[in-house]
Image (spheres, rainbow, N blue to C red):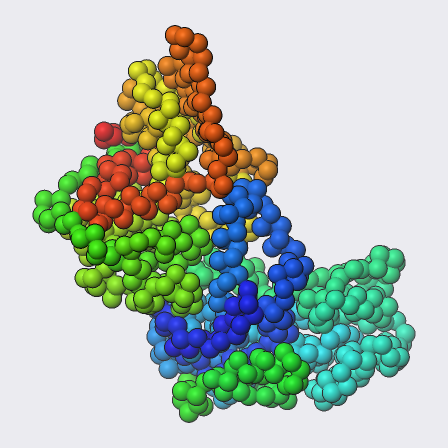
Amino acid sequence: MKQVVQNYKSGELAVLDVPVPGCKPGGVLVRSAYSLISTGTELMKVSEAGMSMLGKARSRPDQVAKVMQSVATNGVPATYRKVMGKLDSYTPLGYSLCGVVEQVGTGIDDVKVGDLVACAGNEHALHAELNWVPKNLYAPVPDGLAPRHAAFGTVGSIAMQGVRQGEPQLGEVALVIGLGLIGQLVVQLLAAAGVRVVGADPDPVRCELAERLGAAACGDPASAAVEAAVAELTDGHGVDQVYLAAGGGSNQPVELAARLCRDRGRVVDIGKCRLDLPWNAYYEKELDVRFSRSYGPGRYDPEYELEGRDYPIGYVRWTERRNLACFLDLVARGSVDVEPLVSHIADFDDAVETYQRLKDGELKAVAVLFRYPEQKEEAGEAQAPAVAVPAVKRPTGGAPTPARSAKTPVRLAFVGAGNYATSMLLPHLAQRDGVELSTVVTTTALSAANAQRKFGFAEATTDLDAVLGDTSIDAVFVVTRHSSHAELTRKALLAGKTVFVEKPLALTEDELAGVLAAVEESGNDRLQVGFNRRFAPLLQEARKRFGARTGPASLRYLVNAGRLGHGSWYLQQGTEGSRFAGEGGHFVDTASWLLEADPVSVYAVATSGNEDLQVVLRYPDGSTATISYVTTGAAGFPKETLDLIADGKVLRLDDFVRASVFVDGGVGRKRWVSSRLPKARDKGQSAELAAFIKAVRTGEPMPVPLESLVATTSATLAVQAGLVGGAPVTLARAR
């Protein structure tokens, strides 16, 4: 299928061939009929992409701050790779469309194939021939409403949420500053609610349009016309509400709002404009400044948008989906007229030219629609306490993986192409001799296309079954969200593939048992989990310098994990497990590797709110490892520090940047310190991948024994059981 994309680094716009997105549970696959260009938001994004790197940084200081924090945590090279990887990728455009349901996912019963729906979301209602849309981001189109009008649903919801924030009442007077697409819709919604409206915009054409659509008067904000109209309509008191629907860097809108708003009036910010509030003016009138967040309640809440968990109507009357349905109803009943806003309808194939004309100012428009040729006729008609470590049963059937010729490339498939895969794994594999990147599989079309372009995959698809059935593929990498790891690993093992799965292997004991059942059933135990720290060159050298030990050891591992940003999918504990369940295996595996054994018991305690964890692992020879996993520490402190103490020796690791070993011997004290700082924090990904590829090529045993992978996973899962039970958890079958 085709999709409109932009490279944020170069500014290039393109209509790209990408795989068809999969139809996941909880949503529908929609074939687009019309999609709407937001001449405000989208053109701002297009313009930013054309800036220099310095210009981009100035326009997004919030992102610059994140980059600096990443430098402090991960070092310059890793941060550079991550940032450049994001910038030099195709990003989607669009967030408002109407289309026909082509496929219905499990759990959906309110629409059927062939129904016309309006769709929302900058990840789900894209300028693309097909989109997968979750339940709370689409609404059925009322009978008789034209598809091109229903395509306004999302921007209509944005305008409606802004009006709701203003709490208008019959007979009030409102000022709308900025008469672009959103402003024009706000004018109509206010007029439909019985509010008299004054509009302000420097463009006389837009002012005339707003008056035709219900505004009492409009004019240039720099002229006296707007102030005169407000004085006449309010008897000199000032307007009850002001709606800021303007963009740009001028502070004029907020200053005008203060001047023309009545005492204790309401100012609602809908657009992205400068908000340098003149303190005296706002203080003296005690103005109520409010923000309107996109389409309404539910926006930016992954449980609402992605998992379909609705808010009870008794507590949240107007969610983003209810706003979408309400706006469609108003348009269908003629209370809002969007046809006069349509300045231009372009064929979808002409998308790049259309954006360029808008950017250059050649095409002056309030609203522009893309029409999808394949849907012209159809869309016009479609109106209808003890935790047992599972015993590893070695395969009884099947043959070991045969050795391969050194000249035969190892063919790899990737399931998932997110940040970790594209910044920490694929750069190492794309440069490795004897490796062929065969196929990348993702649920979203564009991420697969990006990975194919950047790393040279031969194919990009959303069809997992086709990849698992491809006998020419030697190994499958599972690099998806945590909740899917166990099931995808199970399927790949049953398909006879060698599997590399990023941590965690499983989020529950049942999931772990399912993976082991697949090993036994298939006769395939070729599995590696991405516990990379044991492969880190600095830690490998330190362990060698530390040498063998004769007595039990004490190990302390401090992980200064830090807080996650709002909206991170790591916070979705209901589906993705706890944060420690997701990444704690790294630290358990490192401790067990250094102590050369698997733990026999786990004891865990947490601070109030479970923000910081203390996990104590006990080993067969009496050794202990304490993992302090904290999120409340200072961001500038190193992320990982480790001390291993035994037999008069101490090994110290400082965040994979510096290591040292202290030894008390018969002839005095010896000390080894890593001779120089490495160029970057090397946490072992490259060496780990080299060991994995070698095992695939030669048929040799996997780099980490399956028993160890299972023991580490069981110990990580036992932490939650220990927190609930408040007592040590015995790992009954640890080796």
* Relative height, residue 410 to residue 618 (above, below): below
Left or right: where does residue 443 sit relative to residue 315? left
Q: Is residue 329 visible?
A: no
Q: Position of residue 258 (x, y in %)?
A: 83, 66
Q: Position of residue 18 (x, y in %)?
A: 39, 72
Q: Is residue 40 visible?
A: yes
In this orientation, which residue lies closer to the viewer: 707 or 108? 707
What residue sits 29% from the left and 43% below the top? 691
Q: Position of residue 490 (x, y in %)?
A: 24, 52
In this orientation, which residue lies closer to the viewer: 207 or 171? 207
What residue sits 26% from the left and 50% below the top? 499
In this orientation, which residue lies closer to the viewer: 505 or 89? 89
* Relative height, residue 182 to residue 733 (above, below): below
Q: Where is residue 313 in the image (x, y as percent from the top left)?
A: 53, 63
* Relative height, residue 442 to residue 141 (above, below): above
What residue sits 32% from the left and 46% below the top? 689
What residue sits 60% from the left and 55% below the top? 63
From the image, which quarter does the C terminus lie in? top left
From the image, which quarter does the N terminus lie in? bottom left
